[in-house]
Image: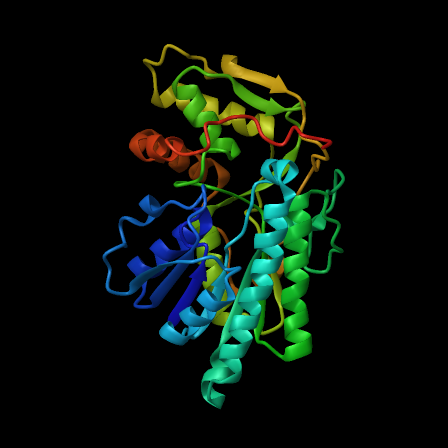
Amino acid sequence: MKLLITGGAGFIGSALIRQLILETDVDVINVDKLTYAGNLESLITVENHPHYHFVQADICDAEAMNAVFDQFKPTAVMHLAAESHVDRSIDGPGEFVQTNLVGTYTLLEAARKYWLNLDDEAAQAFRFHHISTDEVFGSLGETGLFTEETSYQPNSPYSASKAGSDHLVRAWLHTYGLPVLMTNCSNNYGPYQFPEKLLPLMISNALVGKALPIYGKGDNIRDWLYVDDHANALRVVLEQGKVGESYNIGGFNEHTNLDVVHTLCDILDELLPDSPYIPHKNLIEFVADRPGHDQRYAIDATKLEKELGWTPRETFSTGLRKTVEWYLNNREWCEHVLDGSYQQQRLGLQTES
């Protein structure tokens, strides 16, 4: 099998590639533009492997995408490339529309052109797996879960652009017959995550005694999914999923942001007994909430469990501890990431032009 993976230098994409290269004999072609959040250091363990190939290219570049298909002749596509940070989408929505919508369209067309020229057997086996987010569903009340039948109601430029990409993929299935699979996941966490996200930001700040900023009251609820569990689920869907179906991937772990940070601080207190900042909870600082901040997300992954037999391996407790330990043991990686354009500045405060 040859897998074309877009966005493979990102957080989820790199986790997926590390699994595939280290645990299978699949050939992987990683196509990544290497924006601020793309980091090839996340792939050092596999970069010289004979089954791994890297192409630096923009998914919005039709000529480059056609060339990748022509050169590598993949048997499947796993499309993860996307602008993904809500705060950044508030400050600059244009990039999200371009990458998440135009880029997905361009990749779909390149894949369709390639697929139409395959022989019957190869065309039957080909898959286009589109990886998306639970944020396309909007915000939940105090009860209920997102299912595969939940109506879309995106509330940020990011989620709107991802919802649009989901609709494009579905349209290419129904209009052109392209054999697609779709997944929507809950909030990922784990090693190698870019430090603008909650957990790595809290960890890196706590290590140097900086404030731990929590939006609003910290009562926003997310369903937390360990990134290696997500990568495993993506592999299961690609191998066993039914063409045209959508599968929700969640960790069955609902927690408020404040509870998450409190637990993280407790782990840091334990692992860093000589830190001058103990108790780390004293670093918590409540800041102005994000505009349009969705209150609660929660995924119902029952379909994936019943039909394909997938369940997460990590509990939130085990996954969070592994995450904290990884960041403590890989401070050099974090320092290299922070040498770039992102310096932990607050984003997403702009509400008008």
Quadrant position of the C terminus in the picture:
top right
Viewer-closest of 24 and 157:
157
Image spot of residue 168 (x, y percent): 66, 65
Residue toward you, 202 or 23 = 202
Q: Which image quarter is the N terminus in?
A: bottom left
213 above or below 90?
above
Left or right, 99 with respect to 75, comes to right
Q: Position of residue 208 (x, y in %)?
A: 39, 17
With respect to residue 240, does 117 lie above or below?
below
Residue 115: x and y, percent? 51, 79
Residue 321: % across, % down: 41, 33
Towards the viewer: 299 or 30: 30
Q: Residue at x 37, y 72 (%)?
A: 72
- Residue 215: tell me if it is visible: yes
User: Residue at point 63% right, 51% down?
Assistant: 97
Is residue 298 visible in the rendered image? The answer is no
- Viewed as shown, does residue 94 lie left or right of 314? right
Image height check: is 11 above or below 337?
Answer: below
Residue occupying the point 32% across, 44% down: 41
**Residue 104 falls left or right of residue 157:** left
Which corner quadrant of the image does residue 5 belong to? bottom left
Task: Please state which of residues 152 and 227 is positioned toward the viewer in this rendering.
Answer: 152
